[in-house]
Amino acid sequence: MFERLSRNPKMDTSSDARLHQAAQQGSEKAMATLYRQHGALIYRFSLRMCQDPAIAEEVTQEVFMALMQQGERFDPARAALSTWLCGIARRQVWKHLEKRQRDLPGGLSECDDEDEGFEAASPDDDPATVLTRQEAVTMVRRGIDELPSHLREVIVLCEFEEMTYEEAALIIAVPVGTIRSRLHRARLRLKSLLQCEPASGGKEKLR
Amino acid sequence: MNKISKFDEALKELRQEHRRIAAPPLEAKLLRATRAVNKNTKRTLWIWCAASAAAAVLLLAVALWISHHADPGQTNIVVHAPTPHSPASQENTTSHTAQKAPDTANQPALLRTGERRATHRVHPELMSNFISLPGTEGLPVPAEPSIVRVQIRKGDLQSYGIEVPPSVAAEMIHADFFLGEDGVPRAIRLVL
């Protein structure tokens, strides 16, 4: 476990709140500024989750349309605008994932927050082949793409977007403890990939 | 370098790679959508304003119709009349107007012009004095005057220089018109 310093979004929230208010009153400039500030975050998150640029773009557009049409639901006292937008994006992403998974055999992998009995990577293990840095990056990238959705979203929000546990908890609507637990399990799974030899092709398939 | 630090290194690089992903060019689409929403909002606002204005006009029309058809009641009305005493009876008026020489100083009050009008309240039980009608200053003194009693709307008295409260404008009242032989009314007297 590691300590995650809490980001202080106060500097951003006041300007976000002003921009949001202006956008609600119909300011095109404010809406454009909000998109420039938060559009990339929403798109990145959606892309990592859906792994489809077209769907990610669609989700991004839906999120900002929701901001335009239902922006009065945003309460700056409860969360930052980026958090609120990510919450909408997550719901849209899951709708797409569920729709896609319905068409595939096996269905969407169920969210299982119980201990899976996964062994942590031990520093004493001695891999047969020393992975190069690029190989490690490739394996971890692939590993993230193959993670179950409920673990992948935590990695994306906490590791890639560097959000705090509290922000991630608000977005995913779970307790902070659940976020910590999922993040830990996701990291364990990804670390275990580095035990495999890429040349042998025997990489472990993540469930 | 051990696996854990390799993992952290890999994660760090992936984080940088992730943060380099740019947003798609949706700004133009969003601005078009914003304009469409603004347009709809303005249109809705205009419709509401128009509907409110129409409702207000309708209410006003109904109120005016009701006041026009309301039952007349006993109310004081304000009458502008010349300050000097004026003839109170039909005989006096008729006999006076038979005079040929229109001497301004001796003319009855109803024919005097240019005098400051005083405002006094007429008791509803009394008959008002004759009041000169506006625009009759240059008319000759009638030799054979007549008095015609009519029933008119109180609101119409304003055209004869008599102020009437709007609340009773729709009520009817009897009035005696002092006419010359030419048929032109010179004065009016209210029968309250």
Image (spheres, coloured by chain):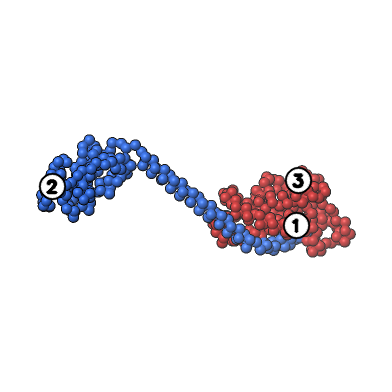
In percent of width and height, residue B82 lies at 18, 47
Estimate the spatial distance between the alpha carbons at disc 3 and disc 2, rounded to whole Å. Answer: 115 Å
Dot 2: element: loop
Q: Which residue is mark 1?
A: A51
| Secondary structure state at the residue bearing disc 1 | loop
Quarter of the image where the N terminus of chain B is located: bottom right
x and y percentages locating residue A11 in the rendered image: 57, 57
Question: What's the residue type where badge 2 is placed?
Answer: Ala
The part of the image, by quadrant, that contains residue A159 is: bottom right
Query: SS for tag 3?
Result: loop
Determine whether, in the image, residue B188 is placed left or right of residue A25: left
Query: Which residue is labeled 2 in the image?
Result: B98
- Residue A146 got which mark? none
Visual hue assigned to chain A:
red
Disc 2 and disc 1 on one polypeptide chain: no
Image depth: mark 1 or mark 3 in front: 1
Asked if the residue under mark 3 is in contact with the one under mark 1, i.e. CB atoms within 8 Å, the reply is no
For chain B, give the colour. Answer: blue
Q: CA distance from mark 2 to mark 1?
A: 112 Å
Observer-nearest of A166 and B150 = B150
Along the viewing direction, whichever of A178 and B36 lies nearer the viewer: B36
Specify which label sits upstream in the sequence, 1 or 3: 1
